[in-house]
Amino acid sequence: MILVLSFDHYEQGTDPVIDWLLYHDANFVKITIQDLIRKDTAFKIDINRGRIFVEGQDITDEIKVVWYRRFEADLMIDLPKGKHSEQALFELRNEVDVTVSFLKKILSDKKWMPYNEGIRLEKPEVSFMAEQQGVKTPKSIITNNKQDVLAFQNEVAADLITKPIRHSSYFIDGEYTYSIYTQKVSKENIEELPEKFVLTLFQECVDTDFEIRVFYLDGKFYATAIIITEKESNVVDVKLNYESEAINWVPYQLPEAYERELDAFMKSINLNTGSLDIIKTKSGEYVMLEINPVGQFSAPGYRCNYNLEEKIAKWLIQYDE
């Protein structure tokens, strides 16, 4: 059996893969974080025996492969407003966190995509480990003061960029939705900073020819070059050009030596899948920006006819069989 751990509602990466699982008549069950907290699904864990029950059926031994897809990100709890509602919400979230950790422990002997160890990796860790293994990444610092930023800017002798240390979600205010994008930071911008501020990630602004989105699946790479034909377009954060007619998505073949380098690195950090952001510089170098173990792949996959959703479904079925 394939166990899908994902959103209760539509999720653009999960649902198309489930369509292919249905098409291939795969044996799977989907559990969401909401199944752990609401009252319309019978879910039980026998702690002493380490057994998982859904609707009264023990599915522990049937599970051969686990597909983890933003499972814990779907923790939405509404409590009646009251004197202790905030504390109750805090306590309930902790209850769910401990339960999910134990669920992962019970399923630790199954085949995971991605591996549980790799899911927890954050941007700074990935960049640090990549540099240790010779995979080039931009020079980066996390700091809380202007003097360090000025010194860093002098060191790299280029403009800087700033972006969230961790993946940032959306801010919703009524009918408006706000998102955080990568921003360029000039020397003039740095001079305007206060002497001290909250911890912020600064990175050298790499001299970019074009960006490459790569989906990695167990040793195979599906790369898409993003070519922007208007010089006025925003090249610091390519996402700001997604609606532009000047953006072109082109199937791209990474050099074999670089693929081997990336493959060895992915295996070393216990990731059998992930979405990689890579820059090809104007001097011809490849610079890895970051890896998202559960990143989105639908848009580049669709535009380049990679049919990634069926490839993921077939991978899951293969390991189930």
Image (cartoon, rainbow, N blue to C red):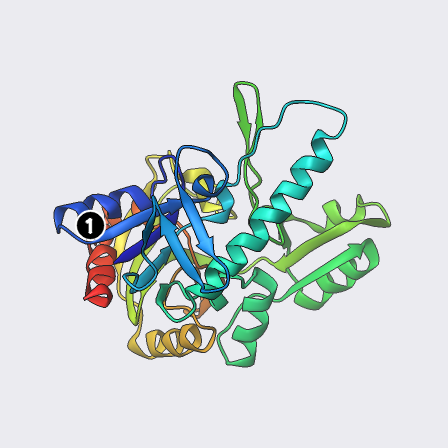
Q: Quadrant of the C terminus?
A: bottom left
Callout 1 amino acid: Leu
Residue lying farthest to the left in this orientation = 24
The reply, left or right, for residue 83 in relation to residue 319 is right
The reply, left or right, for residue 94 in relation to residue 241 is right
The residue that appears at 41% across and 60% down in the rendered structure is: 51
Q: Quadrant of the N terminus?
A: bottom left
The reply, left or right, for residue 312 in relation to residue 297 is left
Depth check: 154 or 48 in front? 48
Residue 15, given in percent of the width and then of the height, sits at 29, 42
281 w.r.t. 6: above or below: below
Residue 266, given in percent of the width and then of the height, sits at 42, 72
46 w.r.t. 138: above or below: above
Depth check: 133 or 235 in front? 133
Q: Quadrant of residue 159?
A: bottom right
The residue that appears at 84% across and 45% down in the rendered structure is: 194
Depth check: 216 or 48 in front? 48
The residue that appears at 50% across and 60% down in the rendered structure is: 47
